[in-house]
Image (tube, rainbow, N blue to C red):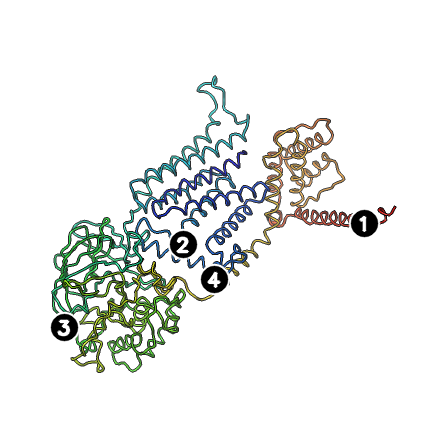
Amino acid sequence: MSGRARLTLYSASATLMAACALLPLVKPATWFLQAVFLLGLQSGVGALTRRVPLARPLTVAAQALVTLMLLTLVFAQQQALLGFVPGPEAFRHLGDLLQAGTDDVGRYAIPAPLSDGIRLMLIGGVLVIGLAVDTLAVTFRSAAPAGLPLLALYSVAAGLSGGGWAWLWFLLAATGYLMLLLAEGRDRLSQWGRVFGGAPRSQGLDAPSGTVAPVRTGRRIGVVALGVALAVPLALPALDGGLLGRAGAGVGSGSGGGTISAVNPLVSLRDSLNVDEDRQVMSYRTNTEDTQDMYLRIVSLDDFDGTAWKPAQRRIQDVPDTFPTPIGLGADVQRSEIQTRISAADWYAQDWLPMPYPVSKVNISGSWRYEPVGRTLVGDHGQNTRGVQYEVTSLIVQPTAAQLANAPEPSKALKREFTKVPSSLPAVVADTARKVTAGSTNHYEQAVKLQDYFAVNGGFTYNTRVQVGSGSAAIARFLKDKQGFCVHFSFAMASMARTLGIPARVAVGFTPGSPQSDGSMSVGLRDAHAWPELYFEGVGWTRFEPTPNRGSVPAYTQTDTPGSDSPTVPKPSTSTSAAPSTAPSASSNCLAEQKKLDACPSQSALATVGSKDDGTPWFQILGYTLAGLLLLVVPLLPMLWRMRLRSVRLGAHGRGEADAPAYTLATWLEVTDTAWDYGIVPDESQTPRKAAARIVRLGLLEAEASEAVHRLAAAVEQVLYAPHPRLTAGLAEDARRVTDALGARASLTARLRALLAPRSAVRVAWSASAYWAALSARLAARRESLLRRPSGQNS
């Protein structure tokens, strides 16, 4: 096996050994076998293209193209041309899979199930890292920097898993990297030969140290890289919820000491659930009979930045003994205090604590922190809701329609923060909001009309299988198609309310659940829900219910005469409807159980509210990008061709006596072509000695460069006329010395022309012409032989 083939093998092995750190994140691990096979094909393509040989950029491009075709064949075969050629539909499908994988990563706990999206992320990530390692270590012959992508792969995986076997994955990754370094060092030393060989032992301490300098450098780089690999995972927090479900990190510095708590706004599931039953998430008992407003709120999504609704990053602090009065709640608003005891299921692991809103006191053990703006509790240092039992004291706030209608304007700071809308939000959203609320005299009337538009008279239907695309235009599509589930309704109403100047956010949690025979309430997966909260000064954050056939419509919104103090009796709760609902999130997530039941849309972009802007189609952008690259690359082709040709002519080939003529003539041709590029046109009629003298004279070369040219000419004459041609040492160094001298004597314009538009590039046209002439001659000879054959047979 050649040195480069061996290096290719070690490169792929190092990538796979580092990728082993990903194995604890997902079950089953069958994806790893696919990654091994595809990485082998990718490495094989690299080995073949380097053997041709192709230019280094072309080798990398060929590997990248084959990698894309392999991923298309495995993950988008139905959408591709011929099953493996990616087109617009294939790219769109791969993008959808990546989005689904991102959602799954944020939803599931470790180990997550192997969904198609996660499988694409894992295999695609390994192939990308493998391509980077192969490019650095094999194509560009620099194995030490190849440790950086390996380090990235290991560090991310080790930081996410945080398991007890992290040392094993580090050992594998480190072993792979060291094997790669040693293989590259061995290959380099084998090429140096006796000139750079080690000194005999008898030379003792005075022996030259140049031999071991490369080895020492490689060791130093390896030690530094491994040290970084040890340190980086220590700085990465181990995840206890979803794989990447750490949106909304809050930093607190309460009296108990500052901590950094990364939290997950979704209902995360630690294991794969039984898809045949609506499993109970929690049960609770409360001392009020009116449970229709007992929404168990997990978290509020109050940051609408144009890419997602998500929890804003805020300070967290120690849980207070008694919570302060809810912001904006006035003393004249009717309220009652209730107590609720909640028990979470043993399998339910959520970073946020589900509680009725607004909470005034919580009695719970464990490591929890308090976020005062959302009035939520967040698990800290791995704390979650698995099997916890806690008591909550909360308020049932009962404002009247008049109090809401007469609410004054909120503070400028609050209004500024909670009425932000992204510039990418389509104008039809604000236009529809104004049309629906036309004739309203206050924000309360506008809010009620928005709720009724979605829930009653707007023609909307509840549909968990709807697909509404992606990007900031998703709300516009939802308003047009008028189909969706709780995420769509709540996100759309909150967005429209903000365009009207009403502070709004989205709450994530559960509807009240179903009453049981023992007097308790049972909350299941299908009770997961999302709803908008609008702010009214004097009342505070107030729940609305725009989703038809879900939850309960608040009593203060059920009146035909806004301002009346006697709202009608609310309808019974329909939270026990058999229709499944998805758990809303900042990234179009639904509950894992419902995903397995196929009860949520495969790609609902409204939940991500503009993960990308639906302006110019992606394939047009890709086309423009390729056209731009083409315009940039085509003018540089002569320069790239010359660089590649110079590398081949002066490369490491021709070291044996048998290769002396070819190597010497190639080196001489490189010198004459370089002189040609600087304006010294070659004269084929002259002998090498006269040609050398001409280059010295016209190029104004000084003594050192002049001697180098004459040595090259003498070497050419020796291989042309000597009975037994011998290899002359130092030809490549002499050629580079002449090249540098010609460039130093030339003007800036001449140097730029020699670089960007070399005259010797015309040899490409000559070669093509000669090839065409030879091909035409062969075809003519073939045709003549076919015409003569009958007469020959009759003779």
Name the residue rendered at 34%, 47% in the picture.
25
Rendered location of residue 261, percent (x, y): 25, 52
Question: Which disc number belongs to residue 618?
Answer: 4
Q: CA distance from mark 1 to mark 2?
A: 61 Å
Question: Which disc number belongs to residue 333?
Answer: 3
Q: As rendered, which of 233 and 120 lies closer to the eye? A: 120
Image quarter (top left, top right, bottom left or bottom right) of the N terminus: top right
Visible residue check, residue 324: no
Question: Which disc number belongs to residue 605?
Answer: none
Given the image, on which type of amino acid does mark 1 rest?
Glu
Badge 1 marks a residue whose secondary structure is helix
Q: Name the residue tied to disc 2.
A: 116
Mark 1 or mark 2: which comes first in sequence? 2
Badge 3 marks a residue whose secondary structure is loop
Question: Which disc number belongs to residue 784?
Answer: 1
Given the image, on which type of amino acid does mark 4 rest?
Trp
